[in-house]
Image: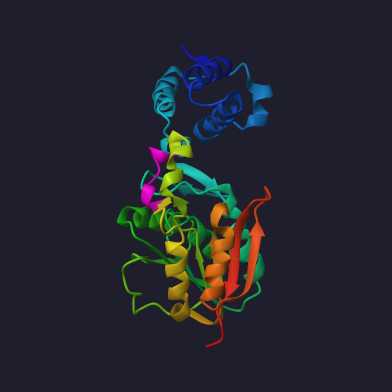
Amino acid sequence: MNKPYSLIKQYFKTSLSSLYDELEINSLFYYYMEMKFGIKKHQFCLSDGDSVLSSSFSLLKKDLERLAQGEPIQYIIGKTEFYGTFFSVTPSVLIPRQETEELVELIIKENREAASLTILDIGTGSGAIAVSLAKHLPKATVYATDISPKALQVATFNAEQNNVCVTYHLHDILSQAIPEIFPTFDLIVSNPPYIPAQEKIKLHCNVTEFEPGEALFVPDQDPLIFYRKIAEAGSSLLKENGKLYFETYEQYHAETEILLQHLHYHSIRKMEDINGRPRFISCTQSIQ
């Protein structure tokens, strides 16, 4: 017997009430229905009497069981939307966040008139930043690195699906020398791990138990380790007056600026996200 949408919505509330509040449950319901069945939120007032096939409902119940365990809905569906494009996501990669779209928008806005660009995305994960930049800055040559072979498989798939060219390299910025085959770059961008390990207890279980910790957390005693290593690498990787773009952790936003000053970057700009939180920093490589 087919199941009406109203009953499915009630199943969501019943299954997820111990884990999420009502607003979040509604958001998950509408997101799931759009991704799985192509029904947008505004269409429900026109289709509330419609129903889902029993065979589809059986799969839905299995998905709800996973949601009730805290697994992110993006992993269950296998994709997420970022900067107007769908990206494949698996537990091997961090789920791209809305705030990071603002970083991509900033880079595109400031560099769209460039005659040519070479870009390096360090810690690419799903490839969301690199692919989006390659797609919207068609004159750019884009490289990207990650420490995880599985992440690079996902990123490569996302580049292929979006018909863009990104050159990927397996690389650990913390311990490995810069590959000699790298060119020099007009800009380097990174949304690196930045959450101190001690902050883990404050995060929702759908983050701490399912998303890759190596993409999230840094040692408490050295929370700026990735910013320092990337900025140090920038001294040789960036062209004269090349730019660095970072997404940062609010708690260490000011300290990141000081770090960049000590490493002789100039024109440092600290920027807030749409919610008014310190989120982004850009700076320029000093003239050699």
**Residue 77 in the image: x percent, y percent?**
44, 36
In x, y percent, where is residue 278? 63, 55
Residue shown at 41% from the left, 33% from the top: 71
Tell me what residue is drawn at x 46 percent, y 44 percent: 199
Locate residue 218 relative to residue 133 in the image: left or right.
left
Total residue callouts = 0
- Residue 141 part of the magenta segment: no
What range of the chain is rendered magenta? 207-215
Which residue is nearer to you in this view: 38 or 147?
Answer: 147
Task: Tell whether 238 sits left or right of 109.
Answer: left
Query: 267 above or below 223?
Result: below
Does the magenta-highlighted stretch encompass residue 211? yes
Work out whether residue 162 or residue 119 is closer to the camera in this orientation and state it. 119
Residue drawn at the location 36% of the way across and 54% of the way down: 151
Residue closest to the far top:
1
Front-most of residues 143 and 215: 215
Single out the residue that lies furthest toward the bottom: 288
Q: How is the image coloured?
A: rainbow
Q: Position of residue 172 (x, y in %)?
A: 34, 64
Where does the image place residue 99, in percent across and percent down from the top left?
59, 51
Q: Is residue 83 left or right of residue 203?
A: right
Q: Is residue 83 visible?
A: no
- Residue 161 appears in view: yes
Q: Residue at x 41, y 48 (%)?
A: 197
63 vs 274: above or below: above
Q: 195 or 105, which lies in front?
A: 195
